Image (cartoon, helix red, strand yellow):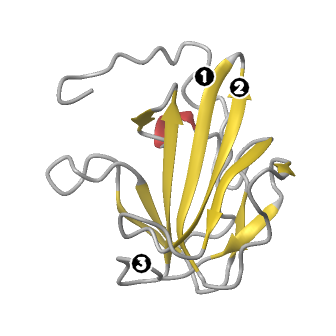
Amino acid sequence: MSGGSVTVDLASIPAGSGAIGWPLRSISNISDRFGARGGSHKGVDMLAPAMSPVYASADGVVSQSTEGGSGGYGAYIRIEHVIDGVRVSTLYAHLSYGTRTVEAGQTVSRGQVIGGVGRTGYATANHVHFEVFVNNAKVDPMPHLGPYGT
């Protein structure tokens, strides 16, 4: 598929439901939101001190866990979930090298530590670049997170 737009039904993941949990418990700032940089930024950058724990946002299965990610992600993890019957993936990029605690094929639980904040890949500050995919389309994660810290 090239160009065009994709319609994604998020009805079963209501805004503010908390179905997708926060990947960090302590955030210094959110530097870039979904759609920043002229629309090309397809995640949320959550700044936090180096080595802060990064948590799985929902129960699922790790599909990717690598120290050398593509597209400037650096060390990253991608987890596949089914939330209210909808296929959802979460991606956690720019992790510190050597901090990943999960491997592809491993089952994880919401709130489980999966790595540590870093600045690997195309990162200029310590943060987690957090992406959410619904039915394989990138969506803004912010409306679907519950209250901060959950």
Q: Is residue 111 left or right of residue 115?
A: right
- Mark closer to the chain start, 1 or 3: 1
Callout 1 environment at 10 Å: few (<14), some (14 to 19), or many (20+)?
Answer: many
Q: Nearer the viewer, mark 1 or mark 3?
A: 3
Amino acid at pointer 1 = Ile
Amino acid at pointer 2 = Ile
Coordinates of residue 11 in the picture (x, y in percent): 54, 13
Q: Is residue 32 above or below residue 96?
A: above
Q: Which residue matches tag 1?
A: 13
Callout 3 environment at 10 Å: few (<14), some (14 to 19), or many (20+)?
Answer: many
Q: Quadrant of residue 139?
A: top left
For this rendering, which residue is in front, 42 or 19? 42
Q: Is residue 48 above or below residue 137?
A: below
For this rendering, which residue is in front, 29 or 104? 104
Q: CA distance from mark 3 to mark 2?
A: 30 Å
Callout 2 environment at 10 Å: few (<14), some (14 to 19), or many (20+)?
Answer: some
Callout 2 secondary element: strand
Q: Residue at x 72, y 18 (%)?
A: 84
Q: Nearer the viewer, mark 2 or mark 1?
A: 2
Q: Is residue 61 left or right of residue 130?
A: right
Find the residue positioned furthest to the left.
Answer: 38
Q: Residue at x 35, y 76 (%)?
A: 122
Callout 3 secondary element: loop
Q: Is residue 32 left or right of residue 110?
A: left
Q: Is residue 148 above or below residue 49?
A: above
| Residue 83 circle label | 2
Looking at the image, how many numbered discs can be counted on the residues? 3
Q: Which residue matches tag 3?
A: 121
Callout 1 secondary element: loop
Q: Quadrant of residue 116?
A: bottom right
Residues under numbered marks 2 and 1 in contact, where contact means CB atoms less than 8 Å apart = yes
Q: Quadrant of the N terminus?
A: top left
